[in-house]
Image: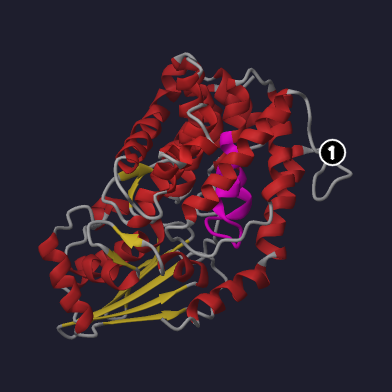
């Protein structure tokens, strides 16, 4: 039986990891570090030097920046310096208006920004900002997670030094999870203690519905419902799951200024963990309690798996997020813990090799693939069908399966990650 103290720890963890964000979290984290450096400097920086780990650079190169109609890091950095507010965290640029964007363009044209890869770090998530002006220099480092300041210095005087903390262990008090613990918490915790997860459904649903009315990114979500393409999918629950989930991603990756609820530092992970569960529950007339518990199961499963990965990895985050949603879907279909574990194994057996090649509009295609697999995995699981331990990287122990997936992503695909970044940075446009 889970104690009240254990429940409180898990609730605190979920509230920390499931938070609102506007825009892709990597460029927003860079903008956040810039805004913090500006505030400490006491003025808009005259020059900004930016050093980024490969994974941050990769995820920030091709994504739209909200409110700008522009893509990539330079405008995010410029706006962080001009109007960013660190108190807003990952919504750091939410006050942006068209006049700010024009000033930001000029700031870029004046060649005040220098962006390079930080090659001497093992951190997957590392952002170092050196801002200078009026004979003062400020260094701000964010590492480990998207809002964790690990080092701050002004004019050689250290203000904060938290560099001993390693990636993925920024909170040593966080409860260590297993799939069993995740399932038990989601299905037995007092409803009023976990009702807050419904905010994720509200934010992400709003983003999807806005996108379905407009042409954002590749308009994948909207295309699924439009004639003549809709005859491929019909108007059933499966089509709506794909449409809503990919539509919210279309909007986010295009840089639409709309908040979404993120999970473990990723808006796309939050979208993929939320909308399939919400759509299925609404279409199948499930109760509010069933929806709340399924959403919590989905989101907490993602957090659990990410404990083994850290924030960023060579593996596409939709693999993890879709695995969470498959657990939520299986629960809504009437599945027990055993069936939920089967769904996890089915997911890992199927799309474990999907690479991350940065945040960009085509992420909606990957999310659609992940969510499609989630539905298939749940359908098999509810019939007590699961991939067995003689197949691939699957183990009898579901938690070992998760660890195998993490090892594949962090160790097995390390060279792949380097190659992907080399391709992305050597393109001629």
Quarter of image, res 401: top right
- In the picture, which quadrant includes the N terminus? top right
Quarter of image, res 217: bottom left
User: Is 362 in front, or is 308?
Assistant: 362
Tell me, yes or no, if residue 221 can be seen here: yes
User: Is 54 in front, or is 358?
Assistant: 358
273, above or below 427, in the image: above
402, above or below 118, in the image: above
- Magenta-colored stretch includes residue 252: no
104 displayed left or right of 70: left
Label 1 neighbour load within 10 Å: few <14, some 14-19, many 20+ = some
- In the picture, which quadrant includes the C terminus? bottom left
Identify which residue is drawn at 17% across, 63% down.
83
User: Is 237 in front, or is 249?
Assistant: 237
Quarter of image, res 386: top right
Residue 383 in percent (x, y) is at 75, 23
In the image as oriented, which residue stretches furthest toward the left?
99
What residue is shown with label 1? 388
Residue 405 in percent (x, y) is at 70, 51
Residue 187 in percent (x, y) is at 58, 20
User: Is 26 in front, or is 255?
Assistant: 255
Residue 279 in percent (x, y) is at 46, 28
Report helix, strand or loop for mark 1: loop
Identify which residue is drawn at 28% across, 70% down.
77
83, above or below 214, in the image: below
Callout count = 1
Residue range highlighted in magenta? 305-325
60 displayed left or right of 66: right
């Amino acid at each position: 039986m889970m104690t009240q103290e254990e429940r409180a720890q898990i609730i605190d963890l979920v509230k920390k990891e499931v938070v609102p964000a506007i825009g892709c979290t990597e460029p927003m984290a860079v903008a956040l570090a810039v805004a913090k450096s500006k505030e400490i400097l006491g003025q808009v920086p005259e020059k900004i030097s930016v050093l980024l780990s490969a994974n941050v650079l990769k995820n920030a190169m091709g994504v739209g920046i909200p409110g700008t109609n522009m893509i990539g890091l330079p405008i995010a950095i410029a706006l962080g310096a001009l109007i960013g507010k660190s108190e807003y965290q990952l919504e750091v640029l939410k006050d942006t208006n068209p006049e700010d964007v024009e000033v930001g363009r000029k700031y870029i044209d004046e060649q005040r920004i220098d962006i390079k890869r930080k090659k001497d770090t093992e951190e997957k998530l590392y952002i170092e900002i050196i801002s200078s002006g009026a004979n003062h220099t400020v260094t701000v480092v964010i590492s480990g997670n998207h809002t964790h300041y690990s080092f701050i210095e002004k004019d050689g005087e250290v203000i904060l030094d938290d560099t001993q903390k390693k990636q993925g262990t920024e909170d040593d008090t966080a409860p260590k999870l297993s799939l069993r613990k995740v399932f038990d918490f989601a299905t037995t915790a007092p409803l009023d203690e976990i009702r807050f997860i419904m905010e994720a459904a509200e934010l992400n649903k709003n983003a999807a519905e806005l996108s379905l009315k407009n042409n954002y990114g590749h308009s994948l979500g909207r295309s699924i419902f439009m004639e003549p393409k809709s005859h491929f999918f019909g108007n059933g629950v499966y089509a709506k799951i794909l449409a809503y989930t990919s539509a919210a991603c279309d909007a986010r990756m295009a840089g639409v200024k709309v908040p979404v609820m993120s999970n473990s530092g990723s808006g796309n992970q939050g979208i993929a963990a939320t909308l399939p569960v919400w759509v299925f529950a609404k279409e199948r007339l499930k109760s509010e309690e069933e929806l709340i518990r399924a959403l919590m199961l989905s989101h907490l499963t993602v957090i659990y798996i990410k404990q083994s990965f850290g924030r960023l990895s060579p593996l596409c985050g939709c693999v993890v997020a879709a695995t969470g949603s498959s657990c939520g879907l299986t629960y809504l279909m009437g599945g027990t813990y055993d069936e939920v574990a089967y769904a996890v194994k089915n997911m890992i057996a199927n799309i474990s090799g999907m690479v991350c090649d940065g945040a960009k509009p085509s992420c909606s295609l990957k999310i659609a693939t992940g969510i499609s697999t989630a539905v298939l995995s749940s359908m098999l699981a509810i019939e007590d069908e699961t991939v067995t331990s003689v197949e691939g990287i699957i183990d009898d122990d579901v938690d070992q399966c998760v660890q195998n997936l993490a090892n594949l992503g962090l160790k097995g695909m390390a060279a792949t990650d380097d190659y992907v970044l080399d391709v992305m940075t050597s393109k001629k446009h």
